[in-house]
Image (cartoon, rainbow, N blue to C red):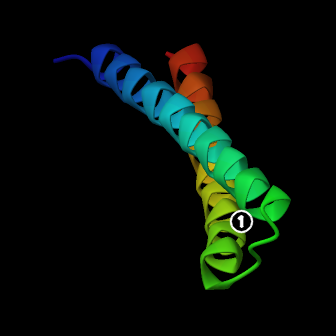
């Protein structure tokens, strides 16, 4: 497998991971809104808020890696 093909596969995997994380982000936000509207602010709500923060950081890392690999493809 050439370096270009390997980079394309990594970009493909990372872009799919990026959209999966966005999907999880949307699902967790809808759950948090549901808990908030039901006036249930408990440990589950706050763990969801913390998970949103972690997913946001993970999404940023994935995005930066996609950019890095795209720059490498541009150099080839």
Compare residues 50 and 2 and report the one nearer the observer.
50
> Which residue is denoted by mark 1 in the rendering?
53
Query: Residue 42: image x %, image y %?
Result: 69, 83
Q: Can I make out residue 65 in this image?
A: no
Q: Is 38 positioned to the left or the right of 60 in the image?
A: right
Residue at far front of view: 38
Q: Can I make out residue 3 in this image?
A: yes
Compare residues 63 and 68 and report the one nearer the observer.
63
Q: How crowded is mark 1: few (under 14 residues within 10 Å), some or many (20 or more)?
A: few
Query: Residue 68: image x %, image y %?
Result: 60, 37
Query: Residue 74: image x %, image y %?
Result: 59, 15
Residue 19 drawn above or below residue 65:
above
Q: Is 39 positioned to the left or the right of 58 in the image?
A: right
Question: Residue drawn at (64%, 32%), measured in percent from left and top?
Answer: 67
Question: Residue drawn at (58%, 23%), measured in percent from left and top?
Answer: 70
Query: Residue 11: image x %, image y %?
Result: 45, 25
Question: Residue drawn at (61%, 37%), measured in percent from left and top?
Answer: 22
């Amino acid at each position: 497998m050439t370096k270009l093909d390997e980079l394309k596969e990594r970009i493909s995997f990372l872009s799919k991971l990026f959209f999966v994380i966005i999907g999880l982000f949307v699902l967790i936000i809808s759950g948090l809104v549901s808990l908030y509207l039901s006036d249930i602010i408990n440990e589950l709500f706050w763990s969801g808020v913390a998970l949103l923060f972690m997913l946001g950081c993970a999404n940023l890392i994935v995005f930066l890696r996609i950019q890095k690999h795209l720059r490498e493809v541009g150099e080839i």
